[in-house]
Amino acid sequence: MPALVSLKGRGHSGRLRPHEHTSYGPLMALLLIAGALLAGFTVSAYAGASPLPQASSVSLTGVMPENPPTTAASITYPSNQQVFQTTPVTVSGTCPGGTIVEIFKNNIFAGSTPCNSNGTFSVQIDLLYGNNALTAIDYDALNQAGPSSKTVTVTYNVQVPPESSLLNVNFTATQLILQTSAVYRGTFPGQQLNVPINILGGVAPFAVNVNWGDNSNEVLPASSNTTVNASHIYTKAGIYKISIQASDSQQHVAFLDVAAIVNGQPASAGSASNTSATKSNKLLVLWPLYVSAVTMVVSFWLGERREKHVLNNALKPAPTLGPVAHPSH
């Protein structure tokens, strides 16, 4: 038994020197905290995901009908009986929040704009020669009209240009006017929006400039009084102001601002779907890593305990043998 005698001679304590400072308690505490955070992330991911439709079920979305606006918009500028010598002019006032305000001049649509969050609106409109009876009507999301505002009457007297340019202007021509639908609703990102623009009066040919309100612009020619069909595809949901300007061969100019509503449901659904897929991919990676870490720590702990147990058994003193009886001769 030389090995045992040698170990005993050095006074071995039986403790494992290489592992006596291993802190499994803090390691397990960190693993428990990480597991709690990962479980919370998992619950959040599945709670935010849209539930799948059950068999034989139909999912519908829509807007429930409600009463039309009861508060009328009010025109605060321009004032009644005000006279203008240039056009366009800015019409501003108050309105119920969440509505679209449409301006009419002598019962002809003149422009539209969304009501701001502070309950005000402002839009540029073109005036007709002579008197213009201006009214404002607010519309809700279902295109239901509220009460008409009080009428404000203004006068447009065309300004006489300098003598040097009199030869370039034809005062016998009719005024150039633009018309289109009041508001364009219900389109979605990625879908084509068509805007028919009616050109009335003026002297051909015409050039129509359309600013779509999303940093894109186009110019459309017209050889006669006709309807110019402008089209555009928006990439993001929102409410856009389409600014239309036309000019004729006699330097007459007409203006028109129109609101376009681009719904956001398809974009939101796609975004939610992408977010859910991203979270699922992260879970597929994080959970296996966490389980591997727990398994590794537990394996090391069990291995160390087994090694210590084996060494402790090996270091136990050998049992003392009693005196050996010799057989008598």
Image: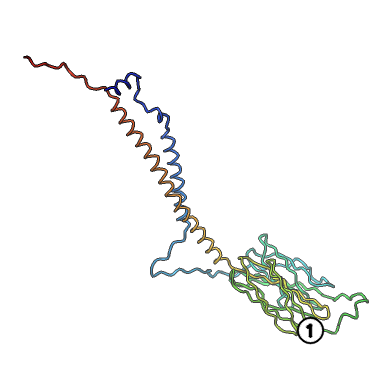
Mark 1 Cα shell of 10 Å, populated few (<14), some (14-19), many (≥20): some
Query: Along the line of sight, which residue is nearer the eye, 201 or 48?
Result: 48
Question: With 97 as the anchor, is 268 left or right in this view?
Answer: left
Which residue is pictured at 30% across the width and 31% down the height?
310
Question: With 171 as the anchor, is 213 left or right in this view?
Answer: left
Which residue is pictured at 53% across the width and 64% down the height?
270
Which residue is pictured at 50% across the width and 61% down the height?
273
In the rendered image, residue 162, in percent from the top left (x then y), is placed at 92, 74
Q: Quadrant of residue 251?
A: bottom right
In the rendered image, residue 16, in percent from the top left (x then y), is placed at 37, 28
- The residue most toward the top is 329
Query: Along the line of sight, which residue is nearer the eye, 307 or 199?
Result: 307
Query: How many numbered marks does the figure carry?
Result: 1
Secondary structure beneath disc 1?
Answer: loop
Q: Quadrant of residue 232?
A: bottom right
Using the image, determine if residue 317 lies above or below residue 156.
Answer: above
In the rendered image, residue 296, in percent from the top left (x then y), is placed at 40, 41
Which residue is pictured at 74% across the width and 84% down the height?
225
What kind of residue is marked 1? Ala
> How is colour applied across the structure in the image?
rainbow
Can residue 149 be seen by looking at this rendering? Answer: no
Per the image, the residue denoted by label 1 is 204
Can residue 239 be seen by looking at this rendering? Answer: yes
- The residue most toward the left is 329
